[in-house]
Image (cartoon, rainbow, N blue to C red):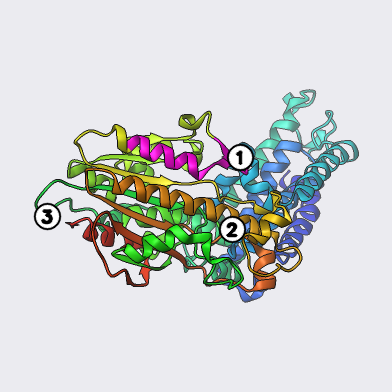
Amino acid sequence: MIEAFWTPLLPPYLIGLVLSFAVEALLTPRPVAPWKRPMAAVGVHVGVWTLAFALELMLFRRPYFAVANVLAIELLIVLVSNAKYKALKEPFVYPDFEYFLDAIKHPRLYLPFFGVGKAVAAGGGYGLALWAGLALEDSVTAGAGVWLVSFADLPQEHMFDPTAPTLLFFGHAIVIAVIGATATVQIGRHLRAELNADADLTHFGLFASLCAYRRLERESIAPIRELASFKATRAAIEDGPLNDIIVVQSESFFDARRAYPTVSEDVLSNFDVLRSESELHGVLTVAAWGANTVRTEFSFLAGMNPEKLGIHRYNPYRKLAVKGFPTIASHLRCLGYKTICVHPYHKKFYGRDKVFPAIGFDEFVDIEHFKDAKLEGAYVADSEVCKKIIDILRESSNQPIYVHVITMENHGPLHWEKISQEEIEGLVTSPLPKSCEDLAIYLRHLRNADTMFGELRRALLHRDREATLCIFGDHVPIMPTVYGKLGMTDGTTDYLIWRARRSSQGVSRPMRIDHLAQAMLNVAALRQ
């Protein structure tokens, strides 16, 4: 009976297995050939294929259509990975599976980089393939005279029971699925990932690298918590009242004049004033490139080098922070501060509605507090965020306040916005090459961010309470055409730490994002 089941399944199973390696070869960077990989990686690939084939077989009961479905899912991941690599210089990793649901909820954040045409073609193509598979290939359990079990093989009591063959089919398919799952888990224990997405994908292949990262994500977070920079809450505080602390995590902010000399100097005139008056300023090495804001965000809040976060460096809010983690917010709350985060976007994005209370924020001011706010492009304008910050400071009591601001205005896709030639001429000193309008659009938003910086400076200088202001960029923007024609940036952003009414020499010092919060506390005279 087992032979009757397996004999018709072997051709589609083996054909699909070979094709799965062929689809994988479309990846950028391309994995090495199967015979050059560790045997454990090949074993995991076979295990995943076996499991996926068995599940699709149970779902559709058509072996060749099952093969086509598994390959279609693999191809989708490959296309997404290649789109991500083009935009962010990083391939698809296991924590990214969460973004498939986010892409449905927030299509503007993802769809432009994958491509609307590709998305429509993929959806239409799959619909056509679904119709063809169901219409052209018969179900293996259709009717009593099924393909996999003859009546001669059935016990006498089931001779005229049409459900008996179906039960046998599902029984065998479940066994195959269990074999695939067991092989994946057991063999996967022998994979040792470097947590370098490019290297792991190249060395292990797609299925094995995803499985290796999944296993690491399920390990205990206790060792990482032991390394937390803000685990201790004691601090040395100067005499006198505590000063307010405002942190502006500016979306895609960096001093574009460093990379492109044609950018007008006055685009960041207020930032220049703050920088000249700052305690510290300089280039900032951040934990993300082009997107993945939460990587830089958490590295600042937790004071943690991404390397210390292990697998959680890719999305620290997914499993690590949601369970609670010591941060500068929890540290300042222990010192008596009221802690508020302002982010003019949906509170559930990245699970911030659950993460922020767990890491020390008393309040989360999300997009619901900006219902009538002006937009710049598709997102809430930085000018509206500035008004909200000033309102919060005005309404604060004698309790010191820590406000962490995460702006949205300069979030891409930049290429979905329009800009006039007149506007472009006011942002650059010489004409831009063709198809580089993204840079001008970026500079338009950068100037708006600079206006916000100037308004905050004036507001803080007129307050009775002392205040410390920290500004930094979370990552550089996504502008592939600009980088291709005008040159790639080094990926660093810019920061400054400024204290109101304190004269300073404006010391320039390169900084890593995981050191920035502690440097800010030193300026605020709250040495940990």
In the image, residue 401 lies in the stretch drawn in magenta: no
> Which residue is found at the position 29% from the left and 42% from the top?
360
- Classify mark 3: residues with Cα within 10 Å, few (<14), some (14-19) or many (20+): few
Q: Are marks 3 and 1 in contact (CB under 8 Å)?
A: no
Segment colored magenta? 374-392
Relative to 291, residue 491 above or below: below
Residue 298 vs residue 142, the one in the foreground: 298
- Count of numbered marks: 3
Residue position marked by numbered label 1 in the rendering: 106
Residue position marked by numbered label 3 in the rendering: 238
The amino acid type of the residue labelled 3 equals Glu
Q: Earlier in the sequence, mark 2 or mark 3?
A: 3
Q: Is mark 3 on a helix, strand or loop?
A: loop
The amino acid type of the residue labelled 2 equals Leu
In the image, residue 381 lies in the stretch drawn in magenta: yes
Q: In which quarter of the image is residue 125?
A: top right
